[in-house]
Amino acid sequence: MSTIKATTRKVDKTPYKKAKFKIPYAGIVTWVYLIVVLLIPIAALFVKASSNSPAEIWRIATTDIAISAYEVTFVTALWAGGISGIFGTLLAWVLVRYDFFGKRIVDAAIDLPFALPTAVAGITLATVYSPTGWIGSIFEPLGIKIAFSRLGVFIAMLFISLPFVVRTLQPVLQEMEKEIEEVAWCLGANKWQTFYRVLFPPLIPAILTGVVLGFSRAVGEFGSVVIIASNIPFEDLIAPVLIFQKLEEYDYVGATIIGMVMLLISLVLILIINFLQRWGQKYGH
Amino acid sequence: MGINPSDDSPNVGKLGRGQGSDFWVKVILIGVSLLYLGLVLFFPVANVVYAAFENGVQPFFAALTISDFISAVQLTILIAGIVLPINTVFGLCAAWVIARNQFWGRTLLISIIDLPFSISPVVVGLLIILLYGKNGWLGGFLEQINFKIVFGIPSIVIATAIVTMPFVAREVIPVLEEVGNSEEEAARILGASDWQIFWRITIPNIRWGLLYGLLLTNARAMGEFGAVSVVSGNLAGLTQTLPLYVEEAYKNYQSQEAFAASLVLGLLALVTIVLKEILERRTGRKA
């Protein structure tokens, strides 16, 4: 599920231009809906937040609990994005280049984290990775606690970010011509050199796009994390859960300001993703 | 695993270290991938099925007859039934505006439509509370006309509409761009009206992309947890959707009920993925 690509459409200057087909009111419907449903609520958040003095906003946005929640959220999501990047690259490679029994099913299953509701993912991950669960019980004797700890948050984020790198990388790998590899071999490169010097560089934009998409999804993830984590401040409390808790305590000011911080970060991430996609398109042509 | 070394390219044998090492690289890479998928995906998914039937078939079906479960299913279907048509109309309009027009701010419009994917669902819920809640911008007005949005079904609809907003547009835009507008222009010259062109040319051209967008919208609408849990109030039997029911049952140590409902949602995910595969084969998006 790649994001919408802003491809520039060929401008057609046919003599029939006046005969252009129009969906009546499409532009109005689009903008009115976006403004009413999305943009006004976002504006409400910023206005609400800015009714506090800047010093007050800064104080609330940087309380110890908030700082630790950002730290847990972003550092864990960064790890999840990175590990997803490594294994996603491997998975895309295996699915594009090799044939094996059950490949089609594996390929289709990659999309499960998109389709499976996060609450379901949360309860099953919490069960499997609990000290008595299938996988948790293997790690238990080693003294590693996964569910209800920061490691559990990491696992949930890993699950949620799994498809992004695979799905952004697969088409790029498929398009890549096999001849390039053969040329590299003929010129005397060994396999590792062929991969590292010839195959890998054009894949970097796609991999990074996938990593940032996965990271931004992991940063915002709530459902599966709130279930698998113990949600204790300074331990495994993530920022979205902190917002949720503040709302439950009727601390609307605190929720609004931390929500604004998270919203601003998502906006920055969108800019980064757009930049990476443009970079990837340049590489492609 | 049916790995056959002779599948490799025929001149592999001439490459010095040759067939043996190629074969083992392949086996190891596939093995590591499957191990990773097993840990992160396959075991957790298998566990949903296992836990749903852990106590046998009888308790599973008994869990599906609980009244809170049934009303959660009904509410979830109702919400999807309201959100799907709204976001289809919006998605089609937005896709047409973006794919068939060049204008200033086009890239900005695409980014705005994509916004809900990047915003945390909890923040989406927060936005709704800040606008429609008791102390929100519209709170006073809504109280006057005695229309309660937050902690009621309207807020669940709005939350779901926001988080599923991009899917249809996102799937239809590339299809519209690919088919071009020559058929539409031909129809126009032959005297067709806008609506005739839309129903007879545009819709048939984009049907698979549109269907895929609807599929994703539906899956997310029925599965949304974060945004809905902020705004719904989570009253069992009244404002509790299926994902909220799953979480509450799990928190109350009603494992059987939680996993039975999870399996129902899991089947929804399975149907979504199978239909997606079929659609992709049909449109030849996958070789």
Image (spheres, rainbow, N blue to C red):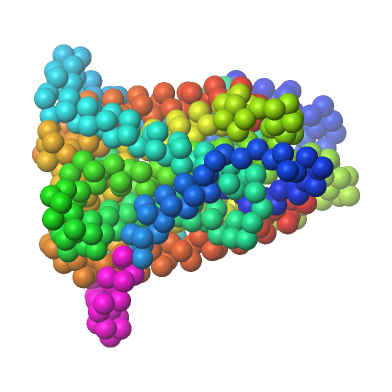
In this view, the residue in front, B255 or B123, is: B123
Q: Position of residue B32 (x, y in %)?
A: 52, 39
Task: Residue at 42%, 66% (x, y): give it.
Answer: A265
Is B120 left or right of A198, judged from the image as shown? left
Question: Is B248 above or below relative to A67?
Answer: above
- Where residue B82 sits: x, y (%)? 32, 34
Given residues B39 and A236, the one toward you in this image is: A236
Residue under the image location 54 percent in, 22 percent down? B278
B21 or A174: nearer the eye? A174
Magenta stretch bounds: A44-66
Residue B273 seen by the camera: yes
Among all residues in the image, which is located at the extreme bottom?
A55
Quarter location, residue B282:
top right
Is the residue A238 above or below the residue B99 in the image?
below
- Residue found at the far top of this picture: B58
Q: Which residue shows up at 70% across the image and 31% down it? A: B188
Name the main secondary structure of what is drawn in magenta.
Answer: helix
| Residue drawn at (22%, 70%) of the image | A254
The magenta stretch spans residue A65: yes
Q: Which of the 4 image quarters holds residue A280?
A: bottom right
